[in-house]
Image (tube, grey):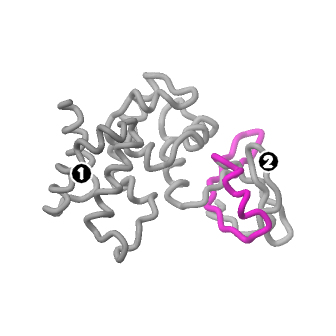
Amino acid sequence: MIDFVEGTIDYIESDFIVVAAAGLGYRLFCPNPYAFAADQGQIKRLFTHQYVREDAIYLYGFSKREERDLFRRLLDVSGLGPKGALAILAAARPEQIVAAIQQENVQYLTSFPGIGKKTAQRMILDLKDKLKGMTPSAFAVSPPASETGGLGAALGEALDALGALGYTDGELQRIKPALKEQAQQGAGVEQLIKQGLALLARG
């Protein structure tokens, strides 16, 4: 099993990149290959998943280990293969996907290519418990504490996650004071997201 590949990004195609390492060129299928355009010609480490079929061996590459782990979780969903899982990761940020599954947002999940209502429900059923330790904040790059402080970071991440679920800026501004008060009382990101959803449901 190849856990990661570290080498120079040699060239980029529409659905894969090629990483040159130790005299070999590794073809890595990625959610968005052109996201690595700025890294072309530079050394990069990509976390990989090796997928073996009777007629082929594929390598899938991800810039973060957490993103690769989410890809593997998506493969656990009945009827969702590597192409489907890759299309989901190409259509949304990992934290958006995790938040939608944890909050059972079927409407958001069915917005992904090839995902119908039944598949979305299977995703929630199969993955909700498995993603408990994979919070949206695990994928986000948190601002330095010196700039925002713990309160601002938690509140900002919660609002970003709610925005990713389709709520408008106006709706988020309406609930922001209540969430800020909860954050001041020590609520974490997940607690703030749940409280925000409850407030938004009241209208």
Q: Residue at x 71, y 50 (%)?
A: 34
Q: Which residue is mark 2?
A: 13
Q: Residue at x 84, y 65 (%)?
A: 24
Is residue 15 in the magenta section? no
Callout 1 secondary element: helix
**Span highlighted in magenta in the image:** 31-59
Name the spot of residue 59 as percent of width and height, x first: 70, 52
Question: Of label 2 and label 1, which has the lower sequence position?
Answer: 2
Residue 7 in the image: above or below residue 71: below
**Quarter containing the C terminus:** top left
Q: Amino acid at mark 2?
A: Glu
Q: Given the current orientation, which residue lies at the most extreme bottom position?
A: 146
Q: Which residue is mark 1?
A: 192
The residue shown at (70%, 50%) is 33
Instruction: Note whether 139 is above or below 86 in the view shown.
Output: below
Along the viewing direction, whichever of 43 and 184 lies nearer the viewer: 184
Check disc 1 and give the amino acid type: Leu
Q: Residue furthest right?
A: 23
Q: How many marks?
A: 2
